[in-house]
Amino acid sequence: MHFFRKLARLAVLTILASSLYAQTAANQAEPIVTALSQQDYGRALLLLAPALKQAPGNAGLWTMQGAALAGQGRKQEAFVAFRHAIQLAPDDIPALQGAAQIAYDTGDPAGIPVLEQLLKLRPGDVTSHGMLAVLQYQQGRCADAVVHFEKASALFATRAPALDAYGTCLVRVKQLDKAAEVFAQSLALQPDAPRARLVTASVQLIAHQPETALATLDPLLGQHADASSLELASAAYESMHDTDKAVDALRQAILLDPHNVNLYVDLAVLSSTHQSFQVGIDAVNDGIHLLPNAAALYFARGVLYVQTAQYDRAQADFDKAYQLDPNQSLSVAALGLATVQQNDLKRALADVREKLARRPRDPILLYLEADILTQQGAEPGSHDFEAAMRSAKEAVALRPSLEPAHSVLAKLYLQAGQFAEAATQCRKALEIDPKDQTAVYHLIQALRKTDKKDEIPALLKRLAQLREDATKEEREQYRYKLVEGDSASK
Amino acid sequence: MQGISSRDVKAQQRPVPSGKPFHAQFTDVAKQAGLIAPTIYGGIDQKKYIVEANGCGCAFIDYDNDGWMDIFLLSGTRLEGAPPGATNRLYKNNRDGTFTDVTEKAGLTAVGWANGVCVGDYNNDGFDDLFVTYFGQNRLYRNNSDGTFTDVTKDAGLLESGPARWGAGCAWVDYNRDGHLDLFVSNYIRFSFEHAPVPGASSTCNWKGIPVNCGPRGLPAGRHLLYRNNGDGTFTDVTKESGIAAATESYGMTVVAADFDEDGWPDIFVACDSTPSLLFMNNHDGTFREEGVVRGVALSDDGMEQAGMGVGIGDYNLDGHLDLFKTHFIGDTCGLYRNDGKGSFDEMTRAAKVGVETSFTSWGAGMVDLDNDGYPDILFVTGSVYPEVEKKLPQYPYKTPRVLFRNLGNGTFEELETQGGSGITTPHSSRGCAFGDFDNDGDLDVLIVNMNEPPSLLRNDLNPMRNWIKFKLEGVKSNRSAIGARVLVHFGGKVQAQAVVSQSSYYSCNDPRLHFGIGEAKEVDVDVFWPNGLHEVFRKLSANRLVTIRETVGVIPSKGWKS
């Protein structure tokens, strides 16, 4: 982001030369401005010392002090001087610009309010928008940042890192089509960068543009294709319902990189999606042969065993996965899944609680505990119900993005007759996963118990649409059935 | 995605047994009663198409008005053609615990893929008629009052045109309160052997990795129909103008018509397989609005589709409102829905401890008082739709036991796995079932359709006996069968609601005499809400008898009762 610094520095000096002169007694300011313009910061500071003693409330002098200190590389002191000037004159543009520049250079979030103030005074200042966008991006405030990225887009057109930051923010705020466009713009600036190509294709896939993603990947898919490109291509083919090619690409990727655990897991998922469980199990077996200590492979095979009702084998695989990687919450989740598939909620609860004793603040374990207790039919007012409520609340507090935990909490609130709280949790769940049918349904049920029924008709339509979409999606997903010894067949 | 919705939910933990004795014992007396013909329905070891899998219903009907319940059993056929004896059957009650097959004499011999039956006096001549749904042309049989029936489908204007429909559930319902029974028919899927996929063809044709018959998912859903009775023996299709056509497409199955919101007008509930169930609320102007989702009976408590098949209707918590119980596929709980009296339901499956059972594919069901203690129990029949799976996965047998839940009287139920007798524990692949008192001994027996086996007739030997009372209603201004009437019985400080319906359970029709166990109470007060809106009250009716009430006339002598 060096270009911001140059732009900003030029702006500061230009403005110093004009506006400070007006603020400060001409006889005092003139030699200081001259020294600053000649980049003689030592002399400027010498001249400023008596001037500030004489007029400590003069914002212009403090701004010049900041500029001189900044010129000497004494950024921290310069920032203090600029801040002092801003306190004396909140609309002092040179001081605001100076402070913003330093904060931007050091990635200091204190620059955000400074830039916001600056933009109030100069709303069309593209440079300030760009600096603010970057600072907000660095702070993870993507929803705010994308607005300023957009306003500063003219500055970014030829700068790949800035475009990447913008694109990343767009992904985070789920503006996927726009993100794909921005990453494609970035790729156009660096067409020979394979990583940029992979990232762009990934985003295009997330944006449900598999054809575009394949076109992006095309230069990487020749004779010298690597496993990563093939893995992505496989996902693109599958999205285009070309399961033959998806399987071929994955198998080719495995040949190129047989020690890549993810590839076997991908093949397992693909097999599971098409209800070709044995094909998936065979593929994972190959992986386990080469990678006998890969917990993810045992986990994947366990899931496939559950789906073929081989619960004992599933349980053994989940145990093995947990043994290999005790920190992997997912295998614990699967362990619970296998147990409950056998209608043994009691055992599932005991398993989860045993793990919780060791990791009491694991949000997934807390969610699972709440979920199992709910499924056991814990009644409002009972000890189990209270425990479920406590765990669900803790799970969402520890990991606000854990959508199923919001869903369970909503269900508990519904059962407890706390309909407003249930509605709130449903809304949170829907913020994370707008396709969550359960959350929409629970929201309808919560609202029907309150006086706020106006929203219900729209929610009913939304639920019907979600059901339709889900059915369509499932139908497409399961259109193919993989066959042993063959890539795929309809 | 498999062919039939199942949430793969976990059974809730079984509570500690109550230790209370259960006095109803069920013994299968079908053989000695003369019900020996098997119900032919598709392949025995394998079902190639879903048409073979869903089976059919049955009915208790007093077709000769002698006061004793006769039996009507539906039948299917086979893909390769009907074997000898494949027909619906009517059995006359000999009043001695046995029955005589009078099918041929009654003119009811019929071969085809029959599904549902609903019983009602559509022409108000005092004799109950039959409507039977088919994969293919549905049939209306008029009771000729002389022990015979005539197929009047064509004369009644019920012949269908276009591709064959798969008629499923049906219900007689006087939706416009003109005193004539109208007819609602649910349709399951649009199916043709020519275009139907075969086992293993797609994901909806596999279960647990084993190729099985396809559907209903992946196949186009049926549309439901409403026919208005013109009062002259003919019907007019009013599906569109009544608003029924506007409902979402769904795999419709059992239909129950009753006044769920207690506004005096009948509503219609349709259990739907793998799609949201439907609740049509009556607008009082000849139209309906579908509100299943918002009223809490369309989906599971998680908002998911379920394989709704059978429906029990009753008042399990004695609050005077009609609750619903819906059966589902293996891996799912059945659903218990508590009515608040305004037609809004809360799912109480787990709260009522019915969620302890998820092991069976479940069909016909009743919410009925089996031990006359005053609290309606739940009984449902079960059986897999995939006979071929058992060979590879023995944990999923084709024949499974009946399921009995005793009402503990505190809003919860207790599953009795062994206490109900051999009639409960013996496995069959059952479908429809009907509840009624075939031997007029004051307790409820159960008639059950078994796939490719003779039916079961579970005689209830209740000992010690507790008090009870039955009501047979006769409409005057209302339709003669009094279908749609709601009855509140007040006994011992409690109140229980029941309704006269022409179909419930699974594609079946119960004994139309409403049976109330009343425990230790010796007499009851009764509110009758007649289908045409009249409300009558009868006080201090003594227990242990059938009370016949004619609209506006009052209590009249009962037929066929020993005492």
Image: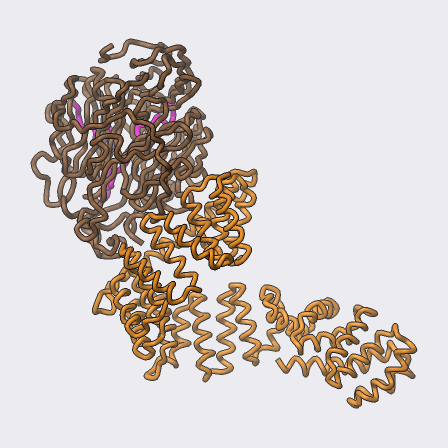
Please report the residue visible at 89 percent of the width from the left and 80 percent of the height from the top: A51
Colour of chain A, in one word, is: orange
Which corner quadrant of the image does residue B100 belong to?
A: top left
The colour style of the image is by chain
Q: Main secondary structure of the magenta part?
A: loop
Residue A435, how many percent across, how many down? 45, 54
Q: Where does residue A31 sit, x and y in percent of width and height?
A: 87, 87
Magenta includes B154? yes
Quadrant assignment for the C terminus of chain B: top left
* Magenta stretch encompasses residue B173: yes
Q: Quadrant of the N terminus of chain B?
A: bottom left
Q: Residue B340 in the image: x percent, y percent?
A: 46, 31
Q: Residue at x 38, y 26 (%)?
A: B176
- A87 or A315: nearer the eye? A315
One can see residue A269 in this view:
no
Residue farthest left in this picture: B84
Name the tint of chain B in the rendering. brown
Position of B277 compared to A395: left or right? left
Query: Which region is colored magenta?
Result: B149-177
Q: Left or right: B361 with respect to A105?
A: left
Q: Position of residue A282 (x, y in %)?
A: 25, 67
Which residue is drawn at the image coordinates 44% and 57% (left, top)?
A: A355
In the shown orientation, is residue A162 left or right of residue B41? right
